[in-house]
């Protein structure tokens, strides 16, 4: 499992900005603070599982076998402006599952 530090280093090596919003929330954005006029989203790890959340908010579970850094890059490069949901084809290619709102709330992601 990748750490927040490893993800930050990987994204910065790919020319993508990011910063820790708090101890368990990494914002992926080339703007600080993140704003909807540019693509930005956040990732967090809960119970050794990665999640990615968009502006809707829409929260997606990232399977352990997927590379969270690669997924962050693909989602970031998918749009020049904020996304509200991940494009279905991209989600399917990386086995991302959108959580129902009540499940995302139950684990403290919204």
Image (cartoon, rainbow, N blue to C red):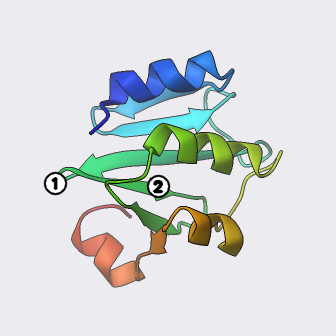
Real-space Cα distance between discs 2 and 1? 14 Å
Badge 1: residue crowd in 10 Å (few <14, some 14–19, many ≥20): few
Residue at left offset 45%, top offset 73%: 97
Determine which quarter of the picture holds residue 2: top left
| N-terminal-most mark, 2 or 1 | 1
Quick one: SS at disc 1? loop
* Of 57 and 13, the residue lying toward us: 13
- Whether residue 69 is visible, yes or no, is yes
Which residue, as the protein is rendered here, is positioned at the far right? 80
Q: Position of residue 99 (x, y in %)?
A: 41, 76
Residue 13, placed above or below residue 48: above
Q: Position of residue 39 (x, y in %)?
A: 72, 45
Q: Is residue 47 left or right of residue 108?
A: left
* Of 34 and 47, the residue lying toward us: 47
Q: Is residue 106 left or right of residue 72?
A: left
Q: Which mark is residue 47?
A: 1
Residue at left offset 65%, top offset 23%: 14
- Whether residue 87 is visible, yes or no, is no
Q: Circle 2 is placed at which residue position?
A: 52
Q: Which mark is residue 109?
A: none
Q: Quadrant of the N terminus?
A: top left
């Amino acid at each position: 499992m990748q750490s927040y530090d490893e993800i930050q280093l990987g994204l910065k090596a790919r020319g993508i900005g990011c910063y820790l919003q708090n101890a368990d929330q990494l914002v992926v954005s080339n703007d600080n603070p993140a704003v909807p006029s540019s693509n930005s989203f956040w990732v967090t790890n809960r119970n050794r599982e990665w999640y990615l959340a968009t502006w809707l908010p829409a929260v997606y579970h990232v399977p352990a076998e997927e590379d969270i850094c690669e997924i962050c890059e693909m989602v970031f490069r998918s749009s020049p402006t904020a996304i509200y949901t991940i494009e279905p084809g991209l989600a399917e290619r990386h086995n991302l599952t959108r959580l129902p709102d009540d499940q995302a709330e139950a684990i403290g992601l919204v």
